[in-house]
Amino acid sequence: MSENQLQRTALNDAHRRLGAKMIDFGGWDMPVTYAGTIDEHLAVRTAAGLFDVSHMGELEVRGPQALALVQHITTNDASKLQIGQAQYAGLTTPQGTFVDDLLVHKLSDEHYFLCVNASNTEKDFQWILANTEDFDAEVKNTSGQYTQIAIQGPRASEILQPFANVDLSAIKYYWFANGEVDGAPGIIARTGYTGEDGFELYIDPNASEQVWNKLLEAGKPLGLQPCGLAARNTLRLEAKMALYGNDIDDTTTVYEADLGWAVKLHKGDFIGRDALAQQKEQGLTRKLVGFEMVERGIGRDHYPIFIDGQQVSQVSSGSPAPFLKKNIGLAYLPLSHTAIGSQFHIDVRGKLVAAQVVATPFYKREK
Amino acid sequence: MANLPDNLSYTKDHEWLRLTGDTAFVGITDFAQSSLGDIVYVELPKVGDSFELSDPFGSVESVKSVNELFIPVSGEVLEINEALADAPELVNNDPYRDGWMIKIKIVDSTELDSLLSAAEYEDFIKEQE
């Protein structure tokens, strides 16, 4: 795909002015890094980072049976949500595998706002459309109406507060407020994909550059840095947050992905419930675990995994962890080898290098 | 613009050589380290290993990627930069001095003819951009 066919977010010019290194990320022209991935990663762990994540998709479900539709298509129990609350869920196939993973925000009793993965937006939209017929509800793809900016890190709240017209300290983790950021109306959600405290802002694209620039300028003295997708990946990996396409997809079930906490079998029927209930009863044969390299080497995405001389799977996500200063990753292993401390080998470009299963998340912030 | 000392020789694999007699220090250029980003691991050969021109002799890993290193002239490894094991960031911070990788004994001086001058390498990277 040539550069002029790539989709651009409303902040494309701003990234270029900041000297970002741009890449084609699933058809989007996105910043992969500005000052360097390690610097950006550490800024988020110790101060704050600003991310353009406008490539993420937004789908909105409205109608008298909006809740029933959301319940039917997702694994978590959206009936437990109060207005202003969000939850993580799987959007599942009848096999209990992932069409996508998403965040469900309850805007009102008849209005739910779903944030989905960029490259899955159209697929998810079509999937939900195809499942709406039994419900008095409609789904719209409103992705073009929002710029999504994430401000993440221990100082995120302090930096954002002067620009927000709501009291950020009143927004709890996984809650959100309808408010204004520098006068631009939108959703201010205390969510993120970094393992830190922080906010994800869904605002009008026309206001995005002004908000981006002002937050950067105000946050700079406090250590705020613009952060690219490379740091976003290493941050989410340290926090063991799954990445669709790497760690989860339509061949992995929600239980296998160790995300069973987001499955509520007792909420009533939903797509994939029978398969998941059966798997829960019968037990898993494999599970997604975190590993750390024992010997020198980095087990990267897709590197083959060997146990007793047999290839059993491959690394789903693997990278140096800039804050932990270790080489870590995620992989599906046979259940018999998922205990903490279990050793296995990763084929690092022809050389078998030892790794072991460790407790996750690799990184957990102090509350 | 990338920093390109005049007293070094360069290759199209973005390596530099500092020639002294029949030996040369070898590293990667400022352009290369900047393109790779934060370097987290440098894999080097052992002292005494011998390589033929263009053989892979090691690798440089950044957070995002792995890149093989190719030997710019045939020869035997006389020294390796042990400091890179604990401080791979030296390659980013000082690619032409503290970030050197190996010192090699050159066996065929005619191979030096195909190396690039700083000006030639600068033209080469301009074409790449």
Image (spheres, grey):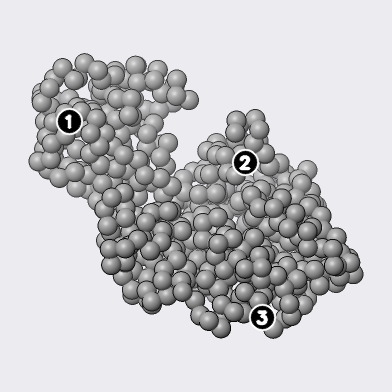
Tell me the element at label 1: loop
Q: Chain of mark 2?
A: A
Residue nearest the viewer, comparing A338 with A6: A338
Q: Describe residue B59's horizontal placement relative to residue B31 as left or right.
A: left
Q: Which mark is residue B52?
A: 1
**Badge 1 and badge 2 in a common chain:** no
Q: Residue at x 37, y 34 (%)?
A: B32
Q: Which mark is residue A265?
A: 3
Q: Residue at x 41, y 23 (%)?
A: B125
Residue type at mark 1 is Glu
Q: Describe residue A331's horizontal placement relative to residue A19 as left or right.
A: left
Between the C-alphas of marks 1 and 3, the distance is: 63 Å
Does residue A88 appear in this view? Answer: no
Proximity of marks 1 and 2: CB atoms separated by less than 8 Å: no
The residue to which callout 2 is attached is: A27
Q: Quadrant of the N terminus of chain B?
A: top left
**Badge 1 and badge 3 in a common chain:** no
Residue type at mark 3 is Leu
Whole-percent x, y for residue A142 in the image = 79, 52
Graded by Cα atoms within 10 Å as few (under 14), some (14 to 19) or many (20 or more), the crowding at tag 1 reads some
